[in-house]
Image (spheres, grey):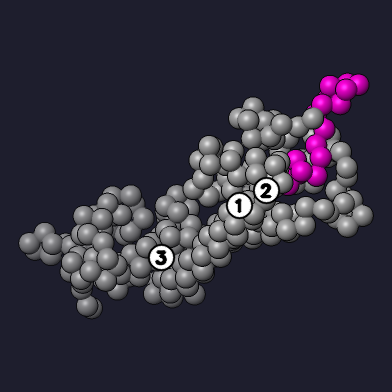
C-alpha cells in the first residue's frame, strides 16, 4: 500500500499541512495510522477524502460538505447523495427566480395579459404566492427600507404593483450574493425610478455566479463519486 506524506497532499490541493490537520479534527476525514516516529500515514482513501472535501466546499460550503462526508464515513451513501441533491435543487430554484427577475427587468411593460398571474395590484398574500417568498420576508424587507408598498385607502392594507413584484424578485435573487443592504437599496430603488439598466447588470452577474456555483457543485459531485468508488460503496 502506498502512503502519502502530508506535504504531498497539501501541495496537490494547494493548502497547508495545518489545514489537513484541521480537517481531521472536524471528524470529516478518517484518522490515519501513525508511523513509529508519529508521522501520519495517509493512504489513497485519505487522498480521495481530501480531494472530495476541497472540491465540494467550493460549491456546497463547509456545513453541507462536512455533513456529506460524515455520512460517507458511516457508509450512508444514499443519505449523503440526497443531501447533495437538495442543494442542487435549491440552486436550480435560485436560477428560476433569477431568470424570472431578469425577464421582468427586460420587459417592465409586462401586464397581466402577457404574464399570467401578474395583477395590477396584489395583496401581500398574492405577492408572496406569485414570487414564492414568505410574507414575513416581504414585511422584513419593507422594515429595512427595501420596499415601499402602497396602502389601500379603504382598509390600510399593503398593495403591491408590478413594480413592487419586480423589486421582490430582485431582492430574492440578490440576497444570496455578496451585496450588503446599502448596495441592495440602491439597486432596488433603480427599479422604482425606472432606471433598470444597473439592476439588469447586477442580476446578470448574479446569474453568472449561479452558473459558476453549478459547475463547482458538479465537480464536487464527481469527486464524491470517485470517493465512493475508492471506498467500494459503488
Q: Residue at x 64, y 27 (%)?
A: 143
Residue span colored magenta = 151-166
Tell me where residue 45 sits by quadrant: bottom left
Q: Measuring from the top left, give residue 13's x and y in whole percent.
A: 29, 67
Q: Secondary structure at mark 1?
A: helix
Determine which of the numbered discs, if any, sits on residue 55 in the image.
Answer: 3
Residue 107 vs residue 9, the one in the foreground: 107
Q: Measuring from the top left, give residue 180's x and y in whole percent.
A: 50, 40
Q: Is residue 90 visible?
A: no
Determine which of the numbered discs, if any, sits on residue 177 in the image.
Answer: none
Q: Are marks 2 and 1 in contact (CB under 8 Å)?
A: yes
Q: Residues within 10 Å of mark 2 (few under 14, many from 20)?
A: few
Q: Nearer the viewer, mark 2 or mark 3?
A: 2
Determine which of the numbered discs, if any, sits on residue 195 in the image.
Answer: 2
In the displayed structure, 175 sits above or below 155; it is below
Cα distance between the residues tagged 2 and 1 = 7 Å
In the visual, does 183 lie left or right of 49? right
In the displayed structure, 158 sits above or below 196; it is above
From the image, tell me which residue sits under label 1: 198
Q: Are marks 3 and 1 in contact (CB under 8 Å)?
A: no
The N terminus sits in image quarter = bottom left
Amino acid at each position: 500500500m502506498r502512503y502519502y506524506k502530508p506535504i504531498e497532499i497539501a501541495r496537490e490541493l494547494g493548502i497547508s499541512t495545518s489545514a489537513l490537520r484541521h480537517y481531521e479534527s472536524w471528524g470529516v476525514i478518517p484518522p490515519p495510522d501513525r508511523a513509529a516516529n508519529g508521522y501520519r500515514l495517509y493512504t489513497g482513501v485519505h487522498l480521495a477524502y481530501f480531494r472530495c472535501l476541497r472540491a465540494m466546499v467550493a460549491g456546497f460550503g463547509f456545513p453541507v460538505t462536512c455533513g456529506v462526508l460524515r455520512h460517507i464515513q458511516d457508509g450512508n451513501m444514499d443519505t449523503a447523495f440526497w443531501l447533495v441533491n437538495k442543494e442542487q435543487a435549491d440552486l436550480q430554484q435560485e436560477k428560476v427566480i433569477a431568470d424570472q427577475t431578469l425577464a421582468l427587468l427586460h420587459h417592465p411593460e409586462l401586464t397581466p395579459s402577457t404574464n399570467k398571474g401578474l395583477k395590477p395590484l396584489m395583496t401581500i398574500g398574492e405577492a408572496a404566492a406569485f414570487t414564492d417568498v414568505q410574507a414575513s420576508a416581504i414585511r422584513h424587507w419593507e422594515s429595512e427600507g427595501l420596499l415601499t408598498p402602497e396602502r389601500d385607502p379603504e382598509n390600510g392594507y399593503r398593495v403591491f404593483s408590478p413594480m413592487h413584484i419586480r423589486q421582490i424578485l430582485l431582492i430574492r435573487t440578490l440576497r444570496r450574493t455578496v451585496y450588503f443592504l446599502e448596495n441592495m437599496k440602491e439597486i432596488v430603488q433603480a427599479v422604482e425610478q425606472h432606471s433598470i439598466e444597473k439592476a439588469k447588470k447586477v442580476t446578470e452577474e448574479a446569474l453568472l455566479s449561479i452558473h459558476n456555483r453549478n459547475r463547482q457543485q458538479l465537480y464536487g459531485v464527481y469527486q464524491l463519486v470517485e470517493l465512493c468508488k475508492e471506498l467500494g460503496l459503488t
